[in-house]
Image (cartoon, helix red, strand yellow):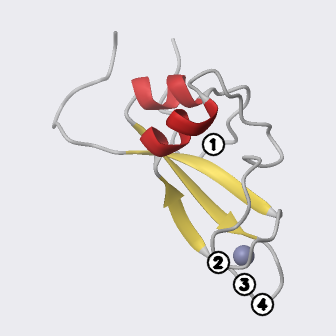
Amino acid sequence: MDKDAAATQPKGWTLGAIRNRNLRLEVYCQSEGCGWFGSFDLDQLIESVGPQYELADDGPGFPCEKCGGPDLKFMLALAHSGAGQEGED
Ligand SMILES: [Zn+2]
């Protein structure tokens, strides 16, 4: 039984698992002078690399969309669409 994965350091997440749980993949760039923050489109990522793509815990493996730098950090955020649901399934 795991708690909400929001804002934790995710480990061993696959794109498919993230989508199944209705989480958003938010990333921020650590390159100096950039600081880009955004979220990746899971459907789009899954289409290109597949749902089994596993995110390394030191970065999603995708370049920053703004500066192209590899120094991205990521976290999972809840993309809530219902109230009062515990997301157990
Ligand atoms: Zn950047």
| Pointer 3 with pointer 2, Cβ within 8 A | yes
Mark 3 lies on a secondary structure that is loop
Q: Which residue is mark 4?
A: 33
Mark 3 and mark 4 in contact? Answer it, CB < 8 Å: yes
Q: With respect to residue 64, does 47 lie above or below?
A: above
Is the shortest distance between ligand 1 and the CB of mark 2 under 8 Å? yes
Q: Identify the residue at image location x=56%, y=24%.
A: 51
| In this view, 78 is above or below 54 | below
Q: Residue at x 62, y 26 (%)?
A: 14
10 Å crowding of disc 3: few (<14), some (14-19), many (20+): some
Nearer to us of marks 3 and 1 is: 3
The Cα–Cα distance between marks 1 and 4, rounded to whole angstroms, is 25 Å
- CB of mark 1 near ligand 1 (< 8 Å): no
Q: Is mark 3 within 8 Å of ligand 1?
A: yes
Residue denoted by label 3: 34
Q: Label 1 belongs to which residue?
A: 8
Q: CA distance from mark 3 to mark 4?
A: 4 Å
- What residue type is disc 2 on? Lys
Looking at the image, is mark 3 or mark 1 earlier in the sequence? 1
| Amino acid marked by disc 1 | Thr
Name the amino acid type tagged 3: Cys
In primary-sequence order, the first of circles 2 and 4 is 4
Indicate left or right for 79 with 42 as reference: left
Label 4: how many Cα within 10 Å (few below 14, some 14–19, many 20+): few
Q: Which residue is mark 2?
A: 66
Q: Earlier in the sequence, mark 3 or mark 2?
A: 3
Residue under the point 58% across and 38% down? 48
